[in-house]
Image (cartoon, rainbow, N blue to C red):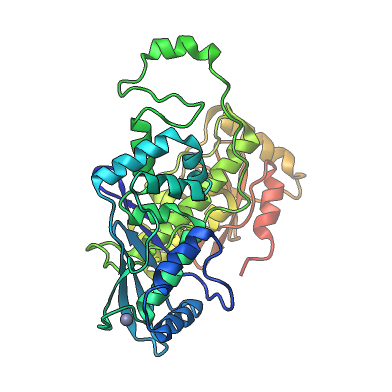
Amino acid sequence: MTRYDDDGTDAERTFAALPPARGRAFAVTWWGRAWLTALEGTALDSGQLKAGRALARAGAVGAVSVRPGRVTAVVQDRDRTPHRADVLLQELSGEQWDRFLAMAAERAGHVAALLDREMPTHLVEDAESAGVDLLPGLGDLEPECECGAWDHCGHTAALCYQMARLLDQDPFVLLLMRGRGERALLEALQARGEASAGRTAQGPDGVDAAEAYAAGDILPSLPALPALPAEPGTPPSLDTEAAPAAGVDPSALEFLAARTAVQAHRLLAEALRDGHGRQPVAPEPTVARDAVRLAAGEPHRAVTERLAEGSGRSREELAVAVRAWRQGGTAALAVLDEEWAVDGERLARARAALESAWDEDERPVLRVRANRWTVAGAPVQLRLDREGRWWPYRGERGRWTPAGDPSQDPATALATAQGTPEG
Ligand SMILES: [Zn+2]
């Protein structure tokens, strides 16, 4: 997770706890190993290093929060006693950042490498010759631990080993510790008007709309649509050492983010499948209907209760609405919630469909109210939607409940409604 400051700079990133990593090296990249050398090369009790490696391997390091000048995690002892451990690294001064940015702006390849999550040795050497040390040297990783140790203890060492794993994956993490996050860094580079080749930075005022439109023909075509990811993404962990603000429920937020990813994935899949220009048939979601979408993601009990309350349904009503959602999204929910008068051409078509669905001697006796046709003497109902589809409904536990997929043919829908009730 990345938190942004008021001025738009990224000020903190939090990484979820990593699974245990038995027997594997902590750093594969040269810069990850250089980080560890800064720890291991100091005159340090080798027992603490060993303890740190064991803790990090066992998955005892909790979510790691990275901020300028500091990285923090809660590390658990073997007996599960938690210790807040910090490792401090000197931030670069404003002047050093200026020199670094001037150097990086001249060498687009360095920035491109960083964006590929690589840190070329040349970049570090060029920074060094500009008087900027990116990687920590011996003794630069300063420990602070709740256990009260004077120097590195097993906890801070474990945090350093964990950091090496994170640095391996993303060298921007090191730059954040040195004071600038990825976004702030790229914005600063762009502000220098020297973004990487092929792109031209605009002035702060942009371009007149008519001018841009007139130039439309000479612009390259838009890039191809992205490929649909196989799965919705996994949201980041919000389990940080900082206490949430009053009224904020991190697990509910995590759930919300996860459901949003699922919904975004679904919408993208539909857009890629249907192309542009297709009019959506489904009714627009409302807050009450969106609460049902969320409830369909099976949140924990407290969230379900809040969704029921917020959507004006009892828990039983919400459960029925979730069933409708799973059958047909917002269209099915509209059929569940709305009763509407069928008249004019729609009524004529509905009557004709009922007329032709059965032979005269097999036709059930149906009592009609608004868009709902109920079989006389049976807990079975057909609901007509505005698209002319018939939705099967069944009376269950004193409540009309969706019983299956809709059909253009009322006889098919009725057979579905009369089928074996779902558990
Ligand atoms: Zn400690």
Report the front residue among 402 and 23. 23
Residue, far bottom: 79
Q: Measured from the top left, where is residue 120 in percent x and y?
A: 51, 49
x and y percentages locating residue 214 in the rendered image: 47, 9
Residue 43 visible in image: yes
What is the quadrant of residue 152 in the picture?
bottom left
x, y percent for residue 226: 59, 38
In the visual, does 324 lie left or right of 207?
Answer: right
Question: Residue 165, how many percent across, how many down?
Answer: 49, 65
Please name the residue shown 39% across and 76% down the image.
157
- Residue drawn 47% across and 79% down? 53
| Apparent side of residue 110 relative to residue 65 in the rendered image (left or right) | right
Give above or below for 297 relative to 350: below
Q: Hey, which quadrant is residue 218 in on the image?
A: top right
Compared with 120, 194 (above or below) is: above
Q: In this view, does 279 lie above or below 28?
A: above
On the rendered image, what quadrant is the C terminus found in? bottom right
Q: Which quadrant of the render holds ligand 1?
A: bottom left
* Image quarter of the N terminus: bottom left
Q: In this view, does 312 lie to the left or right of 52?
A: left
